[in-house]
């Protein structure tokens, strides 16, 4: 099963969750694809590091699997007198993204919204490396 596929792999038809049969079909036609064995211990370690970093903005950062988190920056923005209606929420999203890239060597996407569902949809609309805000 495909656990993750970068943008180039997605263009030629690889998707996360694909079956082994489809993988073999695609590999026959694309010798530039590199298949790596997953390293779950490394995934868990990075997940824990990202959780630690996110707690700067939300002490209750919620892990949703190995590669996704939900955080609520309401308390953080109140504490630092940020008006999340003036666009500073996007700056905050970029700050979080840059910190994770710098300290965990991971590129991330983020979605911003008034609740988890809207933030998730916002994220999905902008992958792989951008962000969009939905009100």
Image (cartoon, helix red, strand yellow):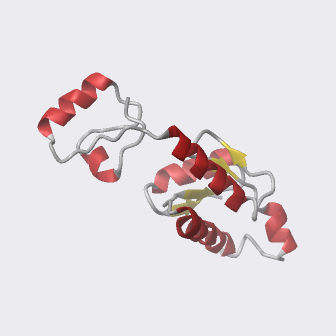
Residue drawn at (60%, 69%), measured in percent from left and top?
Answer: 99
Q: Residue furthest top?
A: 21
> On the image, which quarter does residue 81 sit in?
bottom right
Residue drawn at (57%, 58%), measured in percent from left and top?
Answer: 110
> On the image, which quarter does residue 77 sit in?
bottom right
Viewed as shown, does residue 94 lie left or right of 124? right
Query: Quick check: 12 above or below 8?
Result: above
Query: Quick check: 18 above or below 58?
Result: above
Label total for image: 0
Q: Nearer the viewer, residue 3 or 122?
A: 3
Residue drawn at (52%, 58%), measured in percent from left and top?
Answer: 109
Where residue 97 sits: x, y (%)?
57, 66
Q: Nearer the viewer, residue 18 or 48?
A: 48
Viewed as shown, does residue 34 lie left or right of 43? left
Q: Is residue 80 visible in this depiction of the protein?
A: yes
Where residue 108 sits: x, y (%)?
52, 58
Where residue 41 sits: x, y (%)?
55, 41
> On the image, which quarter does residue 133 sit in?
bottom right
Residue drawn at (26%, 39%), measured in percent from left and top?
Answer: 13
Q: Nearer the viewer, residue 125 or 26?
A: 26
Where residue 38 sits: x, y (%)?
43, 39
Quadrant where the C terminus sits is bottom right
Quadrant where the N terminus sits is top left
Query: Quick check: 126 above or below 102?
Result: above
Q: Is residue 118 visible in this depiction of the protein?
A: no
């Amino acid at each position: 099963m495909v656990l993750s596929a970068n943008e180039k792999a997605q263009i030629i038809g690889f998707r996360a969750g694909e079956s082994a049969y489809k993988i073999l079909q695609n590999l026959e036609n694309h010798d530039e694809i590199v298949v790596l064995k997953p390293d779950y211990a490394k995934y868990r370690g990075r997940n824990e590091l990202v959780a630690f970093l996110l707690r700067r903005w939300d002490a209750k950062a919620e892990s949703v699997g190995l590669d996704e988190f939900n955080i609520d920056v309401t308390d953080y923005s109140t504490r630092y007198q940020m008006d999340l209606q003036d666009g500073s929420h996007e700056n905050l999203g970029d700050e979080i993204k840059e910190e994770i890239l710098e300290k965990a060597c991971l590129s991330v996407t983020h979605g911003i919204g008034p609740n988890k569902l809207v933030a998730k949809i916002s994220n999905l609309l902008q992958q792989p490396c951008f962000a969009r805000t939905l009100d």
